[in-house]
Image: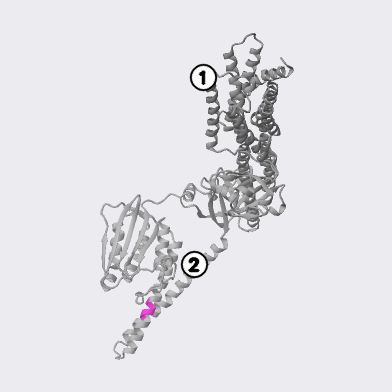
Amino acid sequence: MTGLNTITLLLSGLTLPLALSFLLIVLWSDRRKELNQFFAIFMLLVVLWNAGVFVTQALTLIDDPDPTLINLALGFLELGFTGSSVAVYALTAALARTYARRFRWLTFASLLIVVAYRLLLVATAAPVSPESLINPRQPLSAVFYLLFGAGTLILVGQYHRKIRSRALQIGIVLFVAGQGVGFLNPELGIFALSLGISALAALVISFAVLQQEIISPSAARNSQVEAIRRLNLAITRQAALDTLLNQIARQAALLLDADGVGVFLNYGGVYQIANVYNLPDSYLRVSSRQGIAAKAVQSGQSLALDDYARDWRGVDDLPLAKQTFGSLVCTPLVHGDDPIGALMVVSGKQGRVFGREDVYLLELLGAQAVVAIVHSRLLEEQRELTRQVEYARSQLETVLSSTESPVIAVTRDFHVIFANPAARALIYLRDDLRVIDQLPPEVLPTRKVLREIRRSGAYTYEIIISDKYYLCHLAPLGYPRVSGWVAVLNDVTQLKELDRMKSEMVRMTSHDLKNPLQAAMANLELLQDDVADIDNDDVHEAIAQIDKQLARMNRIIGGILDLERVKLGARTFEYVSPTQIIDRTLDEMSTLARDRDIMVRADVPPDLSSFACDPDQFARAVINLVENAIKFTPSGGHVYVRVQEENGTLVFEVEDTGVGIAEELQPRVFDRFYRGNQKGTEHVTGSGLGLSLVKTIIDNHHGRVTLSSRVGAGTTFRVIIPIHVPKS
C-alpha cells in the first residue's frame, strides 16, 4: 500500500464515523428544516463513498478477494462520490437560499439517475476498477461533475454574502476542487488524492454546518438573553422613551450584527423614525405613509430583503436607501390591534445577508420592544396624570385653605382627612380621634341624612355651632364605593337674622296697613250708599274700581300674613280623614265654581287611611290649588280632585282643563309674588302668593308638590304627603 493510499484510508476511516455522527446530530436538532435535509443527503452520500473506500482498501489486503464484493464496494464509492457532487450543489443552493420548490425535485431526480445507473452496472455485472470511477470516458460521471460542480462554484461566487461562514465557502470550493483533481489523470494515485481532498473538504463542511446550525445558535442565546435583560432593565429603571428606543436600536444592532438600525413609531398612520443607530441623524423625524415600515405593519409580518435596491419596489422610507442599503429586515411592532411602529435593521452593500434566524431574533426582540414602549408610554401618561393631579390638588388645597367657609373631609369611620384653617378655628379637631367623638351629637349627620346622600348624592341641612347658624353641604368622597364624606359649612347667621327682620317687618307692615285699609273699605261702603241715587255712570264706575283695588290690596296683605303665619307659627298635627279636607275644600269653592261656570268633581275612596297634618294649614293648601284651577280654567271647563293611597303616602291630585302653564314658566310658579305673563290669563287677578303658600305648607308636612302641564291642555298638581309624621 502506497503512502497516499494509507492517508486516504485514514481519512476515510476518520470521515466515516464523523460524517455519520454529524448526520445524526443535524437530523436530531431539526429534521424539518430544508437546509438540514439537504445536508443530511450530502452526509449520507459522504458516508457511502467513505464506506466504499474503506471496504475497498480493506479487501485489497486480502489474498484473492471476491470480485463481487469489490464491485459492490466500488459501487458504493461511485454512487456516493458522484452523487455528492449533486448534493453539494443542492446544499450550496440551500445555504444561498436560491432554490425553488422545483429545485428539490430536480435534485432528487438527479440522484435517482445516479442510483439507477449504478444498479444497471451491478445488474450487468460489468467489471469496475478504481481507475474507471472518474474516467472522462464515463460520460455520466463527467456530465454530473461538470454540470453540478460548475454550478456550485458559480453559486459560491455569486452568493458568497449569503453563505456567511467563511469555513463553509472554503470547504465547498475545496470539495469541488478535490473532485476535479481526479479528472486530471484517471490513474489510481490521482483518484486517491481526489478522495482524500474531498473527504477533508467534507469534514470542513460538516464542522461549519454544525457550527452554523447548532453551536452558534446555542451561543447566540446568551446574546439574546442579554439583549432582553438589558431591555427589561431599561423598563424597570423607568427610562424615558428616547433612552428606551436608543437601547432597543443598540441591542438590535448587536444581536444581528447589523450596520444600522431604525426605530419607526406610528403617529396617526404616519411612520416616523424616532431613533437610529449607526445611521445619519438626518434620518430622524423622516416620515412615510407607504414605505417598508408601513407595509410590514399592514401585513402583520416581517419583511426580509436580500438586496434592497433589487428587491424593494415600493416607496423608499429613507433617502439614499437604494444606493447604500444591502440586506434589510423590518418587523412590525404591534400591541393587540394597536400598530405602534416598526423595527428595521440594515446592512451595507458589501455587508452580510440576513437569514431566517435573524428574522426570528428580530421578531423576538421586537416583541420585547413592544412591551417596553407600551410600558414607557403608560409610565409617561401616569407621570403626566400624577403631575396634573398634584397640580389640581395643590390648587384645591390653596383655594380651600384661603376660603372663609369651614371645609372638613372625613373617612368612612369619621377620621379627619383634611380640615382647612377656617374649620380648625371653628372646631378644635384632633387628627388621632374620630370626628364623632369630638363634635356635639346635634352637629353630626343622622342616619336619615346618610340615606339621603346615598339616594340623591348630596344633602344640605342646618346646624348650630357656637350660637351661629351654618348651612352644611354634605357630599360623599369616592366613586363608586364611598370612602368618606366632605362637609362645607356656610355661615348663614346674618342671613337668618336678616330673614327674621324682614319677616318681622313684613308682618308688622302688613298688620299696620290692614287697619287703615279696613277703614278705607268701610268708608267706601258708606260712600256707595250716599251716591246710590246719583244718576252718573262715571261715578259708579270709579267707586267700583276703588272697591276692586282695595279688595285686591286686602287679599295681598292677607296672603302675606298667612304665609308668614305658616312659616313662623306652630303646627298642631292630628290624624284627619282625607274626606274631611276635600269636603271642606268643595264647600268653600262652590260659590266661585258656580260663578265661573266650572264643574268641580271629586273622587275620594271611602277606605283611605287618616293622615297626620295640621287640618287648617293643609286644607288651606288644597283650597289654594283648587282655587287656582278654577281661576285658570275657561267657562264650561272641569276641575277634578282625586285622592289615592300609595306606599305609606297619600296623593292629592288637582287636575283642570284650563290654559296650562308654559314649560319655561313652570320652575318659578312656586316663587313668591311671581305671576307669569301668558295668553289667556289676562282676566285672572291675584297676589302671586297662593302657590308659594302651598309649597311652604307641604314642606312643613314633610311632603312634596309637583306639577305637569301643557299649554292649552290643562295642569295637574300632585301633593304627596306621608300618612304618619316622619321621625327626625
* Rendered residue at 30%/57% (across/down): 643
Identity of the residue furthest to the bottom in this view: 535
Of mark 2 and mark 1, the one earlier in the sequence is 1
Q: Give the numbered dot on residue 123.
A: 1
The percent coordinates of residue 659 (x first, y second) are 33, 70
The 10 Å Cα crowd at callout 2, few under 14, some 14 to 19, many 20 or more, is: some
* Rendered residue at 50%/70% (across/down): 505
The percent coordinates of residue 242 (x first, y second) are 68, 48
The percent coordinates of residue 490 (x first, y second) are 57, 58
Q: Amino acid at mark 1?
A: Ala
- Image-quadrant location for residue 147: top right
**In-image side of 217 versus 485 (left or right):** right
- Image-quadrant location for residue 489: bottom right
Between marks 2 and 1 in the image, the one whose residue lies nearer the viewer: 1
Q: Is residue 587 above or below residue 160?
A: below
Question: What secondary structure characterizes most of the magenta part?
Answer: helix
Q: Nearer the viewer, residue 250 or 216?
A: 216
Would residue 617 be counted in the magenta stretch? no
Identity of the residue furthest to the front in this view: 137
Q: Nearer the viewer, residue 91 or 672?
A: 91
Distance Cα–Cα, label 2 vs label 1 = 134 Å
Mark yes or no: residue 428 visible. Answer: no
Would residue 550 be counted in the magenta stretch? yes
Check disc 2 and report the residue beneath it: 503
Colour theme = one colour
Highlighted magenta segment, given as a residue range: 547-551
Quarter placement of the N terminus: top right
Q: Amino acid at mark 2?
A: Ser
Identity of the residue furthest to the top in this view: 63
